[in-house]
Image: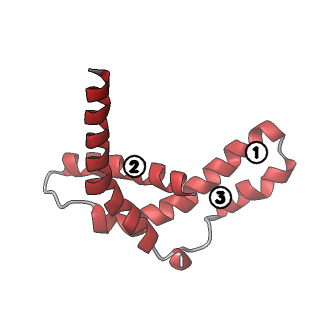
Amino acid sequence: MDRDIEEILKLITDYIRLTYISEIEEAIAECQLENIVALPKEAQLMLAFIPFMPDDSRDILEDIAEVFKYEQVIRQIMPAILPNSNNLEELNLQNIILRLLIYTIIKEID
């Protein structure tokens, strides 16, 4: 029984990766990283503070600065992968979910 459940979960995982996640990963790979503008001033300021921060605070600031970078990548690829919808509430929910998914994928790639 456990083996069957594991096999079913593997099939579902492979299907989701093949159908959805691989498409997003391809869009990320095709993203022109050279076209991304410099980090916003807020992120640059955070990175400038890092050498003066206690060690336990540095990781947090680096993570926040990375979010700014990832947001630029996400903005660049969102139009290609966001489905068309007339329902604004549904579109906003899809937008949020896709942004979280893309952020997670980018984080794993880095």
Q: Helix, strand or loop at disc 2?
A: helix
Q: Is residue 2 left or right of residue 46?
A: left
Q: Is residue 22 left or right of residue 65?
A: left
Task: Identify the residue shown where x is 53% and y is 57%.
Answer: 109
Q: Which residue is mark 2?
A: 101
Task: Identify the residue shown where x is 74% and y is 57%.
Answer: 47
Residue contact between numbered discs 1 and 2, judged by CB atoms under 8 Å: no
The residues bearing labels 1 and 2 have C-alpha atoms spaced at a distance of 25 Å
Estimate how packed mark 1 is, as few (under 14), some (14 to 19) or many (20 or more) residues with alpha carbons within 10 Å: some
Estimate how packed mark 2 is, as few (under 14), some (14 to 19) or many (20 or more) residues with alpha carbons within 10 Å: some
For marks 3 and 1, the one nearer the N-term is 3
Find the residue positioned furthest to the top.
1
The residues bearing labels 3 and 1 have C-alpha atoms spaced at a distance of 15 Å
Q: Which residue is mark 1?
A: 58
Q: Amino acid at mark 1?
A: Arg
The residues bearing labels 3 and 2 have C-alpha atoms spaced at a distance of 24 Å
Say which quadrant the C terminus sits in: bottom right
Q: Is residue 57 left or right of residue 28?
A: right
Q: Amino acid at mark 3?
A: Glu
Q: Which residue is mark 3?
A: 42
